[in-house]
Image (cartoon, helix red, strand yellow):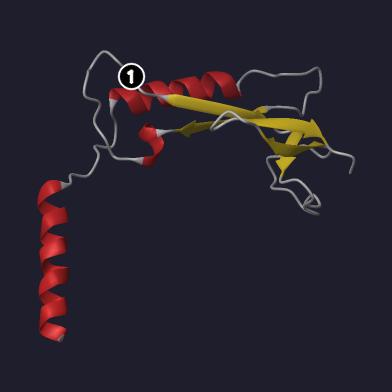
Amino acid sequence: MNDERFFVEYLITQFFLKTCEQRPLFTESAVQAAIKCILRATEHPFDDDEADFIPLTTGSVAEFYIKLMLPHVSDIDVMFHWNTHLAIPPGRAPPTQLPAEFHNYVKVFEIIDSHFPGYVYLQFSSF
C-alpha cells in the first residue's frame, strides 16, 4: 500500500516539476504593478496628513505565476483602500486592534451583498 502511495506522489511531483516553471523575479507586468502601487501610495486622499492609500497588487499577476499570452495586453490589477476606512461582515463587531498601517480613527462600513456577482455594497455602520 505504501509503495503505491509513494509511486503516485512521485508521479505527481515529477509532473509539477516538469510542467510548471517558477516565475522570474522581474517581469514587465510586475514592474508596472509596482510602479502603479508606488504612485498611488504617494498620493494623499484627504487633508489629514496621516490618511493614506494602501495599495495592493491583486489578480492573476499577484496570485499565479503566469506569463501573459499577449505581450501588449497586460493583466495588472492594482487595488487600494484608505487607511481611514474599514469594512467588516454584517453583524460583526469591529476589531479592537488594527494593524499599524491604519489611521488612529477609522470609519466602519458593513459589507452588504448585491445581486451582481463579485460586487458588494458598503453601508456605514452604527458602531
Residue in the foreground of this view, choosing between 96 and 5: 5
Q: Which residue is mark 1?
A: 74
Position of residue 32 in the picture relative to residue 12 (left or right): right
**Residue closest to the eye, 117 or 125:** 117
Please give the name of the residue rendered at 45% of the width and 26% of the height, measured from the top-left corner. 77
Farthest-out residue, top: 72
Vertical placement of residue 121 versus 36, above or below: below
- Pointer 1 local density, CA inside 10 Å: few below 14, some 14–19, many at least 20: some
- Quadrant holding the N terminus: bottom left
Quarter that holds the C terminus: top right
Residue at 75% in and 33% down: 85
Q: Quadrant of residue 81?
A: top right
Question: Measuring 69% from the left and 27% from the top, which residue is drawn there?
Answer: 52
Give the camera-side residue of 123 and 108. Answer: 123
* Residue 32 drawn at (x, y percent): 39, 21
SS class, disc 1: loop
Residue 43's place in the image compared with 68, above or below, is above
Q: Position of residue 60 (x, y in %)?
A: 37, 34
Rendered view: 46 above or below 23: above
When asked about the image quadrant of residue 76, the answer is: top left
Residue type pointed to by label 1: Ser
Residue 26 in percent (x, y) is at 29, 31
The residue located at (81%, 23%) in the rendering is 48
Q: Quadrant of residue 16?
A: bottom left
**Left or right: residue 122 compared with residue 68:** right
Q: Is residue 48 left or right of residue 25?
A: right
